[in-house]
Amino acid sequence: MTHSIDNGIVAQFSGPLDHFDLSVAFELPARGVTALFGRSGCGKTTVLRCLAGLSDVDRGHLSVKGQVWQDDNHFVPTYKRPVGFVFQDASLFPHLSVYENLIFGQKRAGARANIVPIDDLVELLGLQDLLERSTHHLSGGERQRVAIGRALLSGPELLLMDEPLAALDRFSKNEIIPYLDRLFKTLDVPVIFVSHDTEEVERLADSMVLMDQGKVVASGPLSEVLSDPTLFIAKGPKTSSVLDVEVLSFSDKDRITEVGVEGGVLLIPGELGPVGSKRRISIAAKDVSLAQERPSETTILNVVPTRILDIHLLDGARCNLLLSVGHKEQNGAKFLARITQRSLRKFDFTVGQEIYAQVKSVSMVGGKNGN
């Protein structure tokens, strides 16, 4: 990999480490949220430790916003790296209050300016009513919100999070994710978090680094990685695609929102937000059926003209089709459809063919750009 000096993150780590040979390389933007994703034991946490300087490999390069933290002749130790690290266990100081835990992080910043002023951070994380409380009397979600605030108040240039929601039950996850979603949209600092939960990734991440057995198998914008039919992440029963949309209108009578995607429009039950606001939606591959001609009578709201971009066989019975919204070779939004190979043969679907996709269900997974 060519080491470009820019305002983002350039990382390359290779060599024997733990129980496998690590060989990863990726470049990330200077802001936004990146998910490190892959099966258990694939090396996600190891990469996070390399970024923090906690693990060293034979060959490593890391530059953050143009500053070289590591190369063949140079290694910045962990305590000198402006990194915030959030673990599964919040690891708060039990003898300090919530406010005192936050201030501890601020003291670590020294001469570095705070990423977010403490009053703003308290509001973004919903900690106003917890400041004087003992950490012994916090829920799991509340503890993690305090841990994230403490890490950010240390003035990091890079925030690393190692499965920060893994120890929480589903209720606690649903409680904390809106706070994180709102917080990440305000940060001018890159965030890299390890997760094995696709719902977390769909809601929080802008990009993804997909790993398998110590290697990076794909990296890029979240929508592109999730819609790649050749990757192992597209073979599971919960395979889905994410699309960024804009609210176009809302029918108060029907309680249906019309949203625009590249190449077309979709209809979604419920009120998604004000006109012009940006949203992110998810389409499960199993919730898409295909037809050669537009169905004349159907209760399905979204019958979308599409073009087949790729066909990838799975297990002898099923296959994934990569579709692009719109006919006539428009550069439309891409999403996956899961059908049987029997249906593939029956309808003789081919790459480049213009067909219609019936999208049975669309779910909103988050907002975008602060809207």
Image (cartoon, rainbow, N blue to C red):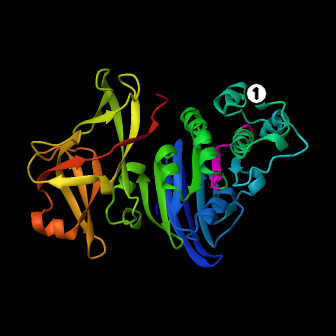
Q: Which amino acid does label 1 sit on?
A: Asp
Specify few, some or many for label 1: CA neighbours under 10 Å numbering under 14, 14-19, or 20 or more: few
Instruction: Name the spot of residue 20 as percent of width and height, x first.
Output: 59, 78
Instruction: Give the left or right position of residue 57, taking residue 254 as reference.
Output: right
Instruction: Give the left or right position of residue 225, taking residue 305 as reference.
Output: right
- Image: 43 above or below 356: below
In the image, what residue occupies the spot 57% across and 44% down? 190
Instruction: Give the left or right position of residue 180, taking residue 332 as reference.
Output: right
Residue extent of the magenta highlight: 153-166
Magenta stretch: residue 322 in it?
no
In terms of depth relative to the viewer, which is nearer, 86 or 241? Answer: 241
In the image, what residue occupies the spot 11% across and 56% down? 353
Q: Is mark 1 on a helix, strand or loop?
A: helix
Magenta stretch: residue 157 in it?
yes
Instruction: Name the spot of residue 260 as percent of width and height, x first.
Output: 28, 33
| Magenta region, main secondary structure | loop
Picture mark count: 1
> Does residue 236 appear in the picture of this structure?
yes
- Image: 15 above or below 308: below
Instruction: Name the spot of residue 202 as percent of width and height, x first.
Output: 46, 48
- Image: 117 above or below 339: above
In the image, what residue occupies the spot 82% across and 41% down? 137
Q: To which quarter of the image does residue 235 belong?
A: bottom left
In terms of depth relative to the viewer, which is nearer, 235 or 18? Answer: 235
> Does residue 348 appear in the picture of this structure?
no
Q: Mark 1 points at which residue?
A: 129
Instruction: Name the spot of residue 124 as percent of width and height, x first.
Output: 64, 30
Instruction: Report the residue that reaches farthest toward the right.
Output: 95
